[in-house]
Image (tube, rainbow, N blue to C red):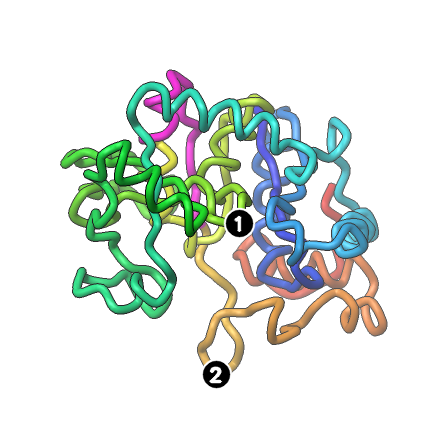
Amino acid sequence: MIGRFAPTPSGRLHLGNLLCAMLAYLSARSQGGQFLLRIEDVDIPRCPRVLAQQAIDDLRFLGFRWDAPPLYQSARSGVYQDVLNRLRREGHVYPCFCTRAQLHATVAPNLGDTQFIYPGTCAHLTPEEAAERAKTRAPAMRLRVPDETITFTDRVFGAQAENLARDCGDFLLQRSDGLFGYQLAVVVDDTAMGVNQVVRGSDLLSSTPRQRYLLELLGCPAPEYGHVPLLLAPDGRRLSKRDHDLDLGALRQNYGPEEIIGTLAHCAGLLERREPVSLE
């Protein structure tokens, strides 16, 4: 059994991140498995190396240990490009020239405030049309999705089903600025690391059908998934790095590692009362 924690170092780790890390760690260790660390800094401008090192230091402070050197996505662009080239040769990927404003103006149904189901505007461009548009705008790369329902069983949320064409739409594998998309990098790296159990926040539950479809296209086995409920702020909103919610910078000034782990363990129902305890 191989589990992992994969933080995005766009800010200091907060208690919500650490809850997922703790549950992933305990699940792996309780089964005699390995625990790996991946730094998801594929969006290099938003994820400076100093924040990645800060995350590693915070995890070590709390007692986390991993069984191999951390894997940095920022060093794996060539690997992602090779996989993207393969998918494009096989006809699964096409260039998309839509601007952000065009996407926000779409009449297609949306998946929330920031996610839109792509209406397929560029899906049927001829090679000549695509070449002409590429003269004035660098394209993003999208994966064609079939009118097919992906099903799986989540260890926390149970049976799941999503029709890719209706509920997701063709999604990005590479942005127009050349940076690779989350879905592609996660699938490639989970496979490369041998990860067969993914424990992460429930905000990523909707990503799982897309990742399972990508794994199917690449002929790779899908891991087991467990999506844990998010820790919320007192006003009911989800914790975020952007809002500096209960991050380790503040917590480490006032609490020791066992006090922080004990609080998280109590929140997760692993302890009847809040008390200091180590990960082990």
Residue shown at 57%/51% (left/top)? 20
Q: Residues within 10 Å of mark 2 (few under 14, many from 20)?
A: few
Closest to the observer, 230 or 120: 120
Label drawn at residue 276: none
Asked whether residue 78 is drawn in magenta, I would say: no
Residue shown at 62%/25% (left/top)? 33
Q: Residues within 10 Å of mark 1 (few under 14, many from 20)?
A: few
Residues drawn in magenta? 213-227
**Amino acid beneath label 2:** Asp
Closest to the observer, 151 or 71: 71
Q: Which residue is mark 1?
A: 177
**Which callout, 2 or 1, points at the residue further toward the start of the chain?**
1
**Amino acid beneath label 1:** Asp
In this rendering, would 20 be left or right of 66?
left
Closest to the observer, 263 or 16: 16
Residue shown at 16%/48% (left/top)? 166
Q: Which residue is mark 2?
A: 235
Percent coordinates x, y for residue 85 in the rendering: 45, 24
Between marks 2 and 1 in the image, the one whose residue lies nearer the viewer: 1
Percent coordinates x, y for residue 186 in the rendering: 51, 37
Residue shown at 35%/37% (left/top)? 131
In this rendering, would 212 be left or right of 192?
left
Percent coordinates x, y for residue 208 in the rendering: 37, 41
Asked whether residue 224 is drawn in magenta, I would say: yes
Question: For the C terminus, which image quadrant?
Answer: top right
